[in-house]
Each structure stands twice: as C-alpha cells, then as structure tokens.
Image: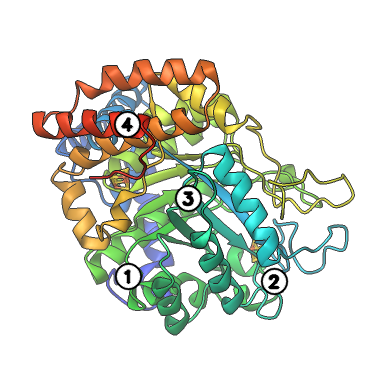
Amino acid sequence: MYKKASRQAEEFINHQEILASMEYAQKNKGNRKLMEALLHRAEDFRGLSHREALLLLECEEPDLVERMFGLARKIKQKFYGNRIVMFAPLYLSNYCVNGCTYCPYHYKNKHIVRKKLTQEEIRQEVIALQDMGHKRLALETGEDPVNASLDYVLESIRTIYGIQHKNGAIRRVNVNIAATTVENYRRLKEAGIGTYILFQETYHKEHYEELHPTGPKHDYAWHTEAMDRAMEGGIDDVGIGVLFGLSHYRYDFTGLLMHAEHLEAVFGVGPHTISVPRIRNADDIDASAFADAVSDELFARIVAVIRIAVPYTGMIISTRESKATREKVLELGVSQISGGSRTSVGGYVREESEEENSAQFEVSDTRSLDEVVHWLLGLGMIPSFCTACYREGRTGDRFMKLVKSGQIANCCQPNALMTLKEYLTDYASEDTRRSGEALIEKELTSIASEKIRERTRAYLKEIEHGKRDFRF
Ligand code: SF4
Ligand code: SF4
C-alpha cells in the first residue's frame, strides 16, 4: 500500500501508486480544463504532487506546453534569478564490486585500468581544480569496501579541505558514494560534507534488480532507503536523481517526485538537489542498447515540470549534456552545472591514454571552465562559485525556510557577484574578465537592499586588494 511517510522503500515508492498515476495521466491528458487549473495553481509556487506533475508531462496541447515552459522560466527567475552555481566532479577511485550493466566501472570490466588516487595525487588534482577556479567539488568513487573504504573517503575529504594553494580553496565537498549505514553517514557529516548525493538510477524495482544483478547495490530497499539513513545520520542536505534512459521515463519521473515527497513527509525537508543525468556511451557501454532513451525535447519538458513541481529544489546538470542542451535547460530550471570536468580518475593532472580509459562516461561538453564561464556571461547569467550556506549553517529546514520565503536571494545575489569577482581576479582570461566586470556592475543594481548593496561594493573593492572569502 502507498504510504508516503513509511520508512519502507516499497511503500513510499509504491509500484501500484505509480501505475495508478500513469493511468490517471493517460486518461486525463486531453482534459484541458484540468491542465489549466493545475497550471493556474502552480503559479503560487507551492509545487505539485507527483500525479499532477505527471499529468503535465503528458500534456499534448501546444499552447499549454508553452505556458508550462513560461511558468518554469518564471519560477527559475523568482527563486534562482540568473545565477548558475558551478562545480566539478573529482573521481577518487574506479574500483567497484557491483555489476551495474550501464556503468563501465562494473567489476567484470577488464578493459579499464583500475585506479585509486593516493593522498598526494588527490592534492595534485585539487590544486589543478583550484587553479581552474573551482570552489565546490562532488567526490565520486565506485563501491569497494577494501579499495575505497569510508576511512579512505574521510581521509580524502580532510586532505581536500586542508589544501591552500595561492588564493585557491575548496570550500564545499559534496559526496557521491554508495549507500551506507547511519553510523557512516554520521561520520561523513562530521567530516564537513555539503550534500550527500546518491542516484536511484531507476525506481522500478524489477528493472533495478536486472540492471544491478550482483553486489551490494542489488538490494533495492537498501539503496532506496539510503537517504532516510543519511538524514538520520544528520546529513540534512541530500541530492537525488535517476539515470534517464535506463527504465521508463514516466515511471522514474513519478518515483523521483514521490521520493522528494517522502523525505518532506518524514523529515520536514525535501531533497536539496535533483540531478537529471541521461545515459551516455562509455568504455563497454553502448547507450543505444537501452531502449528507453529520452529525446532532447522530452528532456526539456522533464526539466520544466520538475521545476514547477518542486520549486525549492536545486537542479543539477553535468557535462554529460552538450552545450546546446545545457543552454536550453538552464533557463527552464537548472541551477547548478559542472564545468571543465574530467570523468576519469586523476584526469585533471594528466590526460589519459586510450588504453587506460578510466572515465565513467563520455563528456559532451568538453569546454574549459573559462569557456563555460564566458559562455554563461554571454547568456546574461551569473556564474556563481558560492558555497556560503553550508558554511553559515544554513542547511536542511533552516535553508528551506529561507528559500521558501524568497529571502535566500538576499544572500545568493551578492555572494554570486563576490565569488565571480574572485574568479575573474584570480583565474579568468582577459575576455572573460571584461565581460564579467561589466555584468557585476549591472547586477549590483538588482540587489534590493541598499545596505547589502553597499556592503557588497565595499567587499568587491577589498577583493581587488587581495582579500578573499566574503559571504552573506
Ligand atoms: Fe559501481 Fe556506481 Fe558504476 Fe555501479 S554505477 S558499477 S556502483 S561505480
Ligand atoms: Fe547556494 Fe546559499 Fe550560495 Fe545561495 S547563498 S548560492 S543558496 S550556497
């Protein structure tokens, strides 16, 4: 039976409820009145249920689809403005004991070289990332209790936070590692992680078990209930996602929103972020072998409806997607993107040979961070390297209260401008610097409070004189 607040995976991600929602959406997709009423209600920015959102996803009326995109843009603008938070993935190890059929790190793959960074190699990678201008990382490892134990991950986090190189600093480390115990989540929290990220891959239990035939990840309930354990362990910012293309998108889209509703019902705070990756080619993985591929058009629609359904949840897109796709979905709802990413172990210091091939997936957007920043500036967006909230203790429900009231913008806008200024001063090319300075001048005027505006101006001057790390 469907129970949103149950602690059991098959009750809060209930198969029958998803099927019933899919049937409801099919039955009502021609019901203009219902769809119009939903869009009207969503204009109050309080979101939609999984069932309502699925109905919008099915909408076939071109004018209503346009209205839907318009509303997604409006919500994006209201809560996130034109700011885009930047991050980079850092792959620590590609050892893995699982048998996932869509990932080249699966344990049976003998073509790829297995690597695990030493602490000195991590230092070198992080210095390379700092020299690009990154302040926020997402740590990635395969699951391997021997080669990539939790102790190793914790030691790596300490190493990363401890590196001061020129004006560089990694100020927020998000962690994307396998589902683990409450005790281990507690230890991650104590190590000062930002968000704990874990993708469900697919919510369809039967498909999930086929796609994960062996290893600890085969256990659907253990994986699906991981965010509950993370929250119990004190991590109040969690990031969820599915790998679109693995299973049927309607099913996974609905499951994703049900997961968000579950966390809100149990812990009073929904996910901090939702990621929307699509399956990509990699070493022995052929994406075209997966029949449920999501087209670019449908992908844009998915992003827009997620934006409408959960207006307060940040949305992340990686360099899996091309420049053109990223451009399209930025305005519809995505609030965080990676830039200049390497998806191989040790890839920031040294480019790999063909034979080594330790990348988890092929990158579509291969531009440097400076090129990505320049491109965003050209689109009139503010690349932000802000990491202020978690460092100011604004996490979990404290953070959500500020987001829901709209007050967070009083922090986001000046923080975006100040961290962009740091980037321009320390790392940008001449062209990027020029565009960025002009944008900062223009965007300063949009800080509503005169007091904050003037303080921001003063801090920007101090950044020019060598000071760093101001934040609201
Ligand atoms: Fe291992 Fe994760 Fe790849 Fe599965 S998806 S093989 S758990 S690294
Ligand atoms: Fe994110 Fe908080 Fe910075 Fe805004 S102020 S960009 S919410 S970290």
For label 1, count other residues whose C-alpha is less than 10 Å away and answer few (under 14), some (14-19) or many (20+).
some
Q: Which mark is residue 417?
A: 4
Instruction: For the N terminus, give its image quadrant.
Output: bottom left
Task: Establish whether ligand 2 lies closer than 8 Å to the Cβ of label 4.
Answer: no
Please tell me the numbered disc located at residue 169.
3
Q: Residue 370: percent from the left, percent from the top?
A: 56, 28
Between the C-alphas of marks 3 and 1, the distance is 46 Å
Residue wearing tag 2 = 98
Q: Is residue 471 left or right of residue 327?
A: left
Q: Nearer the viewer, mark 1 or mark 4?
A: 4
Q: Amino acid at mark 4?
A: Leu
Q: In the rendered structure, which disc, 2 or 1, sits on the residue that comes first in sequence? A: 1
Residue most extreme to the front: 465
The structure residue drawn at horizontal position 36% and vertical position 29%, both measured from the top left corner, is: 464
Q: Is residue 253 above or below residue 147?
A: above
Q: Earlier in the sequence, mark 3 or mark 1?
A: 1
Secondary-structure class at tag 2: loop
Q: Taking 147 as reference, is 440 above or below it?
A: above
Q: Quadrant of residue 386?
A: top left
Asked if ligand 1 lies within 8 A of label 2, the reply is: yes
Residue in view at x 32 percent, y 22 percent: 440
Q: Quadrant of the C terminus?
A: top left
> What label sits on residue 2 in the rendered view?
1
Q: What separation in Å lies between label 3 and label 4 (alpha carbons)?
A: 17 Å
Which residue occupies 31% across, 76% down? 6
